[in-house]
Image: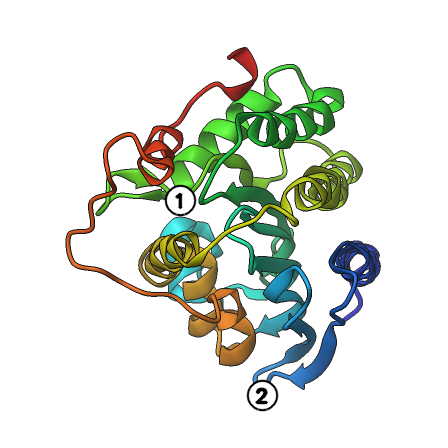
Amino acid sequence: MSHPKLEEVKGFLLALQDQICAQLEAADGQGRFVEDAWQRPGGGGGRTRVLTGGAVIEQGGVNFSHVFGDNMPASATAHRPELSGRSFHAVGVSLVIHPRNPHVPTSHANVRFFIAEKEGEDPIWWFGGGFDLTPFYPVLDDVRHWHQVARDLCQPFGDHLYAEHKAWCDDYFYLKHRGETRGVGGLFFDDLNQWDFQQCFAYMQAVGQGYCQAYIPIIEKRKDTPYGEPQRQFQLYRRGRYVEFNLVWDRGTLFGLQTGGRTESILMSMPPLARWEYDYQPEPGSPEAQLADYLRPRDWLAE
């Protein structure tokens, strides 16, 4: 079945994947994304692109997927019971970048579109997405820049949108078992359909295109900062938190696995190396100890 809305969004997302990969390759200066096209047995497929061993990016993935099926998975119907018994199409771009230098933050972005149908009833559609930043040695100017880009892209869609979607991001990327945020946040939204389709789509486009505007200047500023083995070990320890969030709390990971998605693509967000240490406590007053002050919701643009 042809869906004009779906085809329009899919065309944008395929182009967005190309654009983000090209911009990240240029920022890295050495690495290249390798594409792995795949088909999903239950319907659909995607293009997974992974860059490893770059000058800046230790490992990063930029994934496009379009999956469909006869029934929404349990993770979606638990969140939205009205979707039970509906067939669905889900299309999106999701990416995670793990730089080698501990002074360059890890980053994540995702933009997606769903349409769910049931014979005799109107289709239900919505957009979701966002981007967030996970520094190990945060610099306040970088965090402000990240949030300034987020606020600027939200502004044309409403004065309160940035505050709402920033708060949603802080809440979503919160590790309840650790009592801390995953990083310094950004934007997060889901179930977006309260405007007409074109305005919702325009906002999703702005978020998708805003990611590189927010992230690449930070790469450029921090990629040549010297570091040693202690900083590298702290980075690997903190990457463990990233793994914990993705496997314990992330709805997207659960949705992908429950819909029979391609496991390698779903788990491309995992860092290539990470470590855990029992009851680690940073030295008081050290740069490592300063990270804790960033792992709570704050109004970054008011400081």
Specify the label residue 182 is tagged with: 1
- Left-right relation of 119 to 296: right
Mark 2 against mark 1, which lies toward the viewer? 1
Residue beneath the point at 53% across and 70% down:
268
Q: How far apart are marks 2 and 1 (CA)?
A: 33 Å
* Callout 2 secondary element: loop
Q: Nearer the viewer, residue 257 or 199?
A: 257
Near mark 2 (Cα within 10 A), the count class, few <14, some 14-19 or many ≥20, is few
Specify the label residue 284 is tagged with: none
Q: In which quarter of the image is residue 233?
A: bottom left
Find residue 138 and report its horizontal and vertical position in percent. Answer: 49, 36
Regarding residue 262, the answer to whether it shows in the image is: no
Residue beneath the point at 34% across and 59% down:
240
Determine whether label 2 and label 1 are within 8 Å by CB.
Answer: no
Find residue 252 and report its horizontal and vertical position in percent. Answer: 48, 59
* Residue situated furthest top in the rendering: 302
Regarding residue 52, the answer to whether it shows in the image is: yes
- For residue 191, above or below residue 196: below
Viewport quadrant of the N terminus: bottom right
Look at label 1 and name its amino acid: Arg
Find residue 89 and report its horizontal and vertical position in percent. Answer: 63, 65
Specify the label residue 41 is tagged with: 2
Find residue 187 and report its horizontal and vertical position in percent. Answer: 56, 36
Look at label 2 and name its amino acid: Pro
Q: Nearer the viewer, residue 116 or 21?
A: 21
Q: Quadrant of residue 7?
A: bottom right
Residue beneath the point at 37% across and 61% down:
243
Q: In terms of sequence position, does the residue under pointer 2 or pointer 1 come before the other?
A: 2
- For residue 190, above or below residue 56: above
Total labels drawn: 2
* Residue situated furthest bottom in the rendering: 41
* Callout 1 secondary element: loop
